Structure formats: structure tokens, C-alpha cells
Amino acid sequence: MKTKKFLMLLAAVLLSCASTMAQNSPLKGDVNGDGKVDVADIVVILEIMKNGTKELQSIKWASTTAVNGTTGTTPSLGDITLTYNDGTTGTVAYNASGVTLFTDAAGNTPFSNANPGTFNVWAKYCGMMTANSKQVTLSTPVPATITSYYYYAGWTQPTASNVDTIIDETYPTSSSDSTQHAAGKKTTSKSLFSLASVNLYNSVAKTNYYVLVPIGHAIYDTVFNLQMGTASFTSQGTITVGNQTHTIYKSVDTTRNIGSIEIK
């Protein structure tokens, strides 16, 4: 008995759909005319049951205002206005079950948010296409900018092109101690680079050395805890790396040893 009632209900539902939908849905159970039988057809059936004997006559975008977004995500396209044969209207969201999006009015090319570009988008619902289209522009997301602070003290003059290499330089402690110490580092937040207890020794020659100082930092003498000025260093200009401005300083005196300084 229950089976008979279900079949009668299903028959009534299918007969209540618009005749155009029936003509374009040769697949049994394909109520919305999308070429397959799935949960979207159930949604349409429930819509028909909710509205009784009303038949859907046309659908259109409630607003055709252009929208923008980024690839990988479909931006909010708003609602679709549903118009029935009795003059009443309703709405359904662009991403509701049973709604499919296309880039042509015939419904041959599904809309994809995978690629950047500008598209005219139609929606299909209950076997009908929107009478109008909505322009959607997708752009490639801009990668997040990572801020980096570079610290360096050594005998190579820093440049924007070599800074990632020279911060990995190492020098021995002295002519008799081959223990290696790093000449620099890179961090993603303000930090301290200290040679308070470490000596860097140039085994090649006695010459001027360079210090790379991120914006907001200065060079300090750790013995006297004083900021070192033009008596000790001269500015060699700036470079921009890691989305930060860095000042290059050159020692006034030549030396084989770098020690007792901090960049902070």
C-alpha cells in the first residue's frame, strides 16, 4: 500500500513540472533536466510539493551587478528569482542544491572557478536557465608578503642579490682556533644579533668589514653598552630585502677581528 502511495505521489509530482522540462528530460527521474538522477532532483520535487500545483514559468538573476573574486572560490552571486504561473515569485540561492552554473545560455559549458578571467554566468534550476547572465571576474590570489629581517657582520659587502648567501658565511674564532661562527641570520620578527662573546677572524687579510642593519636597529658596543656612530662606521646606503629597508655600514678601521658588537 505504501509503495502504491509513493508511486502515485511521484507521478503527480512529475506531471506537475513544466512541460518543457519533461520534454528535455528523457532520463527517468531526471526532474531538473540536468542529464542525471541525483539529490538535486529531490530538491526540485520538494520545491514542487511545497508550492502545490504551481508551475515554475521562468527564472532570472535577482541582480546582475558584476562580482569579483579569486580563483579557487566562487564569489557570492546572490539569489535567483523564481516566477510561477500564478504570478507569485520566490528565490533560491546561487549555491543551493539543484542549481548549476554555466558560461553559456545553452547550458553546455559548466562554470569553473579554477582559472582567472571574466565570465558571463547563467544558472540552471528545475530544468530552466536564467533569462539573464551575471558577470564574474576571477583573479589569481596575491601571495602573502613575508617580512624578513637580515643581520650580518663580515667582510663581504651586502647587496640585495647576495644577502641570502652571505648570512650563511662562517669565520673561525682566531688564527689558532678553527671553530666556525655564523656571520649573520634571517628572522621573521625583530631580533638581536650579538657578537658579544664571539669573535670572527679574517684569515685572508686585514681589511674593512660590513654590518647589515635592519630598519629600527642600530650597532652597539657591548663593552661600553653604547651605540656606535660615525667614528666607527660610515653608511654605504640601503638595500630593500625581505620587504624591509636595511642599512649597510662599513667599518672606518681595517681589522682581522669582528667582536664585541651587537645589532639590536
Image (tube, rainbow, N blue to C red):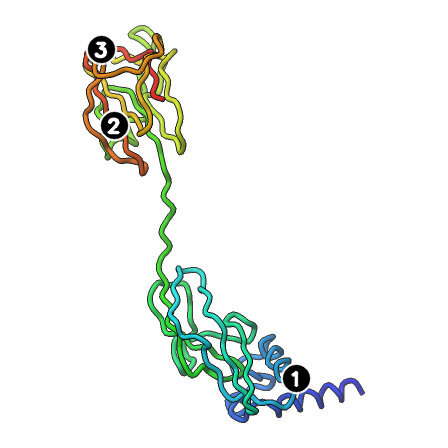
Of mark 3 and mark 1, the one earlier in the sequence is 1
**In the rendered image, which residue does mark 1 sit on?**
49
- Label 2: how many Cα within 10 Å (few below 14, some 14–19, many 20+): some
Q: Residue at x 76, y 85 (%)?
A: 3
Name the front one of labels 3 and 2: 2
Q: Nearer the viewer, residue 193 or 227?
A: 227
Residue farthest to the front?
Answer: 88
What SS does tag 2 mark? strand
The image quadrant where one finds the N terminus is bottom right
Q: CA distance from mark 2 to mark 1?
A: 73 Å
Residue 140 in percent (x, y) is at: 35, 57
Label disc, if present, on residue 171 of the rendered structure = none
Q: Is residue 194 left or right of residue 86?
A: left
Residue 43 in percent (x, y) is at: 61, 77
Q: Label 3 is placed on what type of residue?
A: Thr
Label disc, if present, on residue 255 of the rendered structure = 3
